[in-house]
Structures are given as C-alpha cells and as structure tokens.
Amino acid sequence: MDVISTGLTLLLVMDPLGNIPNFMSALRRVPEERRVGVILRECLVALGILLAVLVGGRGFMGVFGLSSEALRISGGIMLFLIALRMIFPQAGGEGAEAQEEEPFIVPLAVPLIAGPSLIATLMVLTGNPAQSLWPVFLALAGAWSVSTVILLGAPFFARILRRRGLMAVERLMGMLLVVLAVQMFLDGLHLPSKVP
C-alpha cells in the first residue's frame, strides 16, 4: 500500500464522522468554551498511543512469535466485523454515555479514536520487518490530522448532516471498509487478487 491508500484505510477505521454523535454525547455536560480544548487533548492522547503502537508493534509481534500473514488475516477479519457493525448498527448502539464530569482518555481517546481495530490495523501495516515505518507514520499523521479537524468541527457537522446524514456516511464508510478487509485477508493468504 502507498501512503495515500494507507492513510485512507486508517481514516476509515478511525471513522471520525461516525464518532461525532458519541463525542457530542460525551461532551454534553462540558462547557461549550472548553469543548475544543477537550477534543484536541483527547486527539493528542490518542496520537501518542498510536505512535507507541507504531514504534513498538514489531517488538510485540516478535515477543509473541506472530507472523505478518497471521496478523493480516486476523486484522482482515476484525476490520470485516467492524465494517458490518458500521453498516448494520446494533439496536442499542454503542454511543458514549453522557458523563457527570469532563471525559479524560476514556471513552474519547480510547476506544473511540485509538480503538482495538485501529491498533490491530497499525500492527498489520508495520508487521513486515523489511518495510520502512516512515510511509505508515506519514499515513497515520495525515489520517489523524483529518480526523482531528472533523472532530473539532463536530458541532458543525452534527448540525449540517443531522442524525440521518451521519448514519448514511458511516454506512458508506463501512461498505468501503468491507472491501479493504477482504483485500487484507487475501494479502494474508497470498492469493492473487489483482486484476490483470
């Protein structure tokens, strides 16, 4: 994968538009003048966690003896399940419940931004020791920047797109993620999936 396609994959997994209702719910009791600062802080905490995974992912794989193929196949399965949840949301939803106090790290930074699926995707992307980490770092920085801008504009997007618009965008992103998950699975199996 090149930097742009890797960045788009990470952005789809981050799902910033799908997280807008969760962020608005979690920040409902936070004073309006503090919301931008809280969102920026949570995005920076999430970036720190993701950079730690980016740098330490290969070491983790070495300690547990995980192959990049196994990680690609399991990452593909996990992305597929995440995509299905985006396309067919559960009845109760998994929105962040409104809290009495200002959220700190949980649930905004983890798991809404730096969730298990994004961490697994990063580990898959960094699993090949022969591949440089710089393209993945650039892709992560780009995806994180776009996601942060969207989340900082959460009140604006919530007003413009409304609930139905946000649901439609999230389902579209889920359908794209299904294709990426299948490709990741095929890459792990070493099946010739490229059309000549």
Image (cartoon, rainbow, N blue to C red):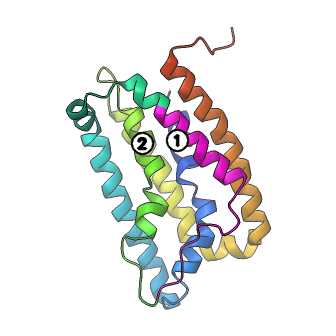
Q: Which residue is mark 1?
A: 78
**Residue 186: mark:** none
Amino acid type assigned to the residue bearing label 2 in the image: Ala
Marks 2/1: CA–CA distance? 8 Å
In the displayed structure, does residue 126 sit left or right of residue 93?
A: left
Q: Position of residue 105 (x, y in %)?
A: 36, 70
Q: Position of residue 115 (x, y in %)?
A: 45, 55
Task: Please tell me whether residue 140 is drawn above or below residue 163 in the rendered image.
Answer: above
Of the residues shown, which amino acid type is indicated by label 1?
Answer: Met
Name the outermost residue toward the top.
Answer: 196
Labels 2 and 1: the sequence-earlier one: 1
Residue at (63%, 61%) from the top-left corner?
18
Answer few, some or many: residues within 10 Å of disc 2's Cα (few below 14, many 20 plus, some between 14 and 19).
many
Please tell me in which quadrant of the rendered image residue 58 appears.
top left
Where is 20 relative to 102, above or below? above
Q: Is residue 18 left or right of residue 6?
A: right
Q: Is residue 87 magenta?
A: yes
Residue under the image location 72 percent in, 64 percent down:
166
Please provide percent x and percent y for residue 114: 42, 56
Whether tag 2 and tag 1 are in contact, CB under 8 A, the answer is yes
Q: Residue at x 63, y 72 (%)?
A: 21
Residue 129 quadrant: top left
Name the residue carrying label 2.
Answer: 120
Please state the extent of the stretch shown in magenta in the rendering.
Answer: 74-99
Looking at the rendered image, the disc whose residue lies closer to the viewer, 2 or 1, is 1
Q: Residue at x 24, y 33 (%)?
A: 64
Task: Say if the magenta span includes residue 83.
Answer: yes
Residue 87 rendering spot, x and y as whole percentages: 71, 51
**Dot 1: element:** helix
- Quadrant of image for the C terminus: top right
- Quick one: label 1, few (<14), some, or many (20+) residues within 10 Å? some
